[in-house]
Image: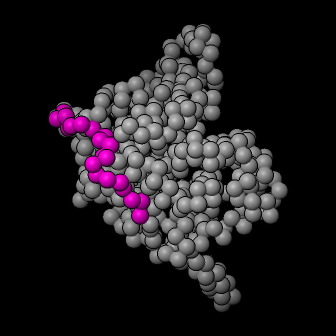
Amino acid sequence: MLKRIGYLIIVATILSSCYAIRAYKYRKLELHDVNIMPFVAIEKGNASDLFLVANHKVDNQPLSKKLDSLLADTYTAAFLIIRNDSIIYEKYFDGFGESSLLPSFSVAKSFVGTLVGIASDEGKISVNASITDYIPELKKNDPRFEKITIRNLLDMRSGILFNEGTYNLKDDAIKMGFRPNTIKQLRKLKIEKTSGGEFNYQSINTYLLAIALQRVTGKKISAYLSEKIWKPAGMEYNATWTVDSKAHQQEIAYAGVNATARDFARLGKIYLEKGTVNGHRILSEQWINATVNKDTMQKYDGYRNQFWGVKRYKIFPDSLDAVNYKMQQTLPGRVSSFINKSKVKSFFIPYQTPEFYAEGILGEFIYVQPEKNLIIVRLGHFWKNKNFPDPVNFLKALAVEL
């Protein structure tokens, strides 16, 4: 009897939490339900200013046949490939189409990082400034928040205590994402370690960047995105941003942008075009180079300004050859080895490439290969295919082939 009472107390405690109730309510959300949760609009501009992601479509039947087969039964909703301003593959699954809004989860982080770049270009925010310059109430939590800079947040090196990765009811990202008033959670933030140290991927960093942007611009992050990117970049459709509640309408900055495949591709296009779209300067070339340049990515271990860099590997049959090559190229890291299925030992050295991408937890990607003027967008749910257990490796291999 006592055990049963104890169990009921635990259940009652969990269910009394607003975020737990909301998480339970939305536990079976499907991709078609993208706007069931509260959201605000991201308004597009004049259709006459449309920034074309592609001038025309190319009928590549061998590629289409191959990708149609590979993408079958992978929970993919949209797959788009644009090369040299031509769509060479565009396919929608499960009833989705060109105008379908699809979730992107952490791809939203790359939009926020881009907006920080725009605000920095405009002199509204400084990457070297303390986060408490923009959110001073954090100092009441812990004076050490003064040592956390905008740069630390951009590069996921803040040292904030934020447990993320389990994505259950104890996960801080889930707790915050389902709170009806996320701003109130700022009072609960704590410091775990010294800022500026090792990389630690935490959604709270992006959320704080969004709040800082709102403070310096005087606008909601969705309105700032509409003004600075959606309209001048000629996005084709209105998009949405998931918010904490209808009452507070605070955007879930780290995981809430819902848009079409082609409009997601336009973010990649902005970076390919070095920030100039339709004759308008959206983002400075300096910021782009400081974000996705391969040397910059190499220096910052493959993550910079809310974007991921791409590493590839040079393989050698002999360790001495590998060491000599590494010394000649002044590549960081060490020479590693692996044994293939034929039990042959080989040696490899990682190196950074010009490729980069934005990524969401369900396998959403905006993948860019600048040397080939190539953009790949994948939207959907988890990838379930033995041919590409690692979707990044699948995209890397596809980029080589195209």
Total labels drawn: 0
**Residue at (54% x, 44% y) in the render:** 118
Instruction: Name which quarter of the figure residue 34 lies in.
Output: bottom left
Residue extending furthest right?
Answer: 143
Residue 277 placed where, x, y %? 39, 39
On the picture, is 55 further left or further right than 300?
left
Which span is picked out in magenta?
41-60
Asked whether residue 361 appears in the rendered view, the answer is no
In magenta segment, residue 50: yes
Q: Magenta region, mostly helix, strand or loop?
A: loop
Where residue 65 appears, x then y in whole percent? 19, 38
Percent of width and height locating residue 11: 60, 81
Q: Tell which of 291 and 297 is nearer to you.
A: 291
Q: Residue furthest bottom?
A: 1
Q: In this view, does 326 lie above or below 387?
A: above
**Residue pictured at 35% horizontal, 59% vertical:** 238
Q: Where is residue 102 in the image (x, y as percent from the top left)?
A: 36, 57
Residue 62 versus residue 344: which sits nearer the camera? 62
Please say if 186 is above or below 159. below
Left or right of 21? Residue 161 is: right
Depth order, front residue of 305/281: 281
Colour scheme used in the picture? one colour
User: Does residue 176 appear in the picture of this structure?
Assistant: yes
Residue at 58% across / 44% down in the picture?
122
Q: In this view, does 316 lie above or below 301?
A: above
Please check the rendered image and state whether residue 224 is part of the magenta-colored stretch, yes or no. no
In which quarter of the view is residue 298 placed? top right
On the rendered image, what quadrant is the C terminus found in? Answer: top left
Image quadrant where one finds the N terminus: bottom right
- Image position of 395 with respect to 160: above or below: above
Residue depicted at 71% across the width and 52% down the height:
131
